[in-house]
Image (cartoon, grey):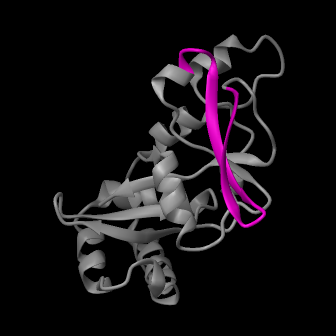
Amino acid sequence: MTTKELSQEQREELINTLQVRFEKNTSRHEGLDWANVQARLEANKEKLWSLHEMEATGGEPDVVGYDANTDEFIFYDCSAESPKGRRSLCYDREAWEARKNHKPENTAMDVAKEMGIELLTEEQYRQLQELGKFDLKTSSWVQTPDNIRKLGGAIFCDRRYDMVFMYHNGAESYYAARGFRGSLRV
């Protein structure tokens, strides 16, 4: 298991990357101040590690909001397409174990847990799509309601024809163009 601590150099590089992205995409987080975000990041090294994992797998995390009730900044993967380093995954471990042949390397739920993040919900995915146009060529698993999962299914979303769609598939399915987007609260 990878240590969940970054070197000083890695922390500085990540914070710089996040600051540049924050300043370049101000419409994603109107009214928020980078100095407050940076102070929170520097005080939460384990969360920085999770953001580093999001970045390393192609997620391009950015601040998309602030929850005043919990006093937390909210980060989502904001890459144009589903993160490259998190594709070709079935939905969860149960689905992975159910596959008889050609098992994928891992599952979306397991990878998210290892990274310390959560899959976006359908609602969060639709909120993300209000900030830009994402997944025009790919799709992303989203958190699946228990009643659907108990029947063997899982849901994913994408954007086509200038609309956001939610679809279903067997949870054991996986595709080169389907990954997952995550969220993290700091």
Residue 55: image quadrant is bottom right
Left-right relation of 177 to 24: right
Image coordinates for residue 5, horizontal then vertical, percent? 37, 55
Image coordinates for residue 60, horizontal then vertical, percent? 57, 68
Which is nearer the eye, 184 or 66?
A: 66
Which is nearer the eye, 156 or 13?
A: 156
Which is nearer the eye, 134 or 106?
A: 134
Above or below, 57 against 151 in this view is below
Figure quadrant of the C terminus: bottom left
- Magenta segment's dominant SS is strand
Above or below, 163 against 167 in this view is below
Left-right relation of 41 to 146: left
Q: Residue at x 57, y 65 (%)?
A: 129
Q: Residue at x 32, y 54 (%)?
A: 46
Label tally: 0
User: What range of the chain is rendered magenta?
Assistant: 149-170
**Visible residue check, residue 120:** no
Q: Residue at x 32, y 84 (%)?
A: 34
Above or below, 113 against 71 in this view is above
Left-right relation of 62 to 141: left
Q: Residue at x 59, y 15 (%)?
A: 151
Is 12 in the magenta? Answer: no
Left-right relation of 133 to 23: right
**Visible residue check, residue 65:** yes
Above or below, 136 against 175 in this view is below
Image coordinates for residue 22, horizontal then vertical, percent? 45, 82
Image coordinates for residue 27, horizontal then vertical, percent? 47, 84
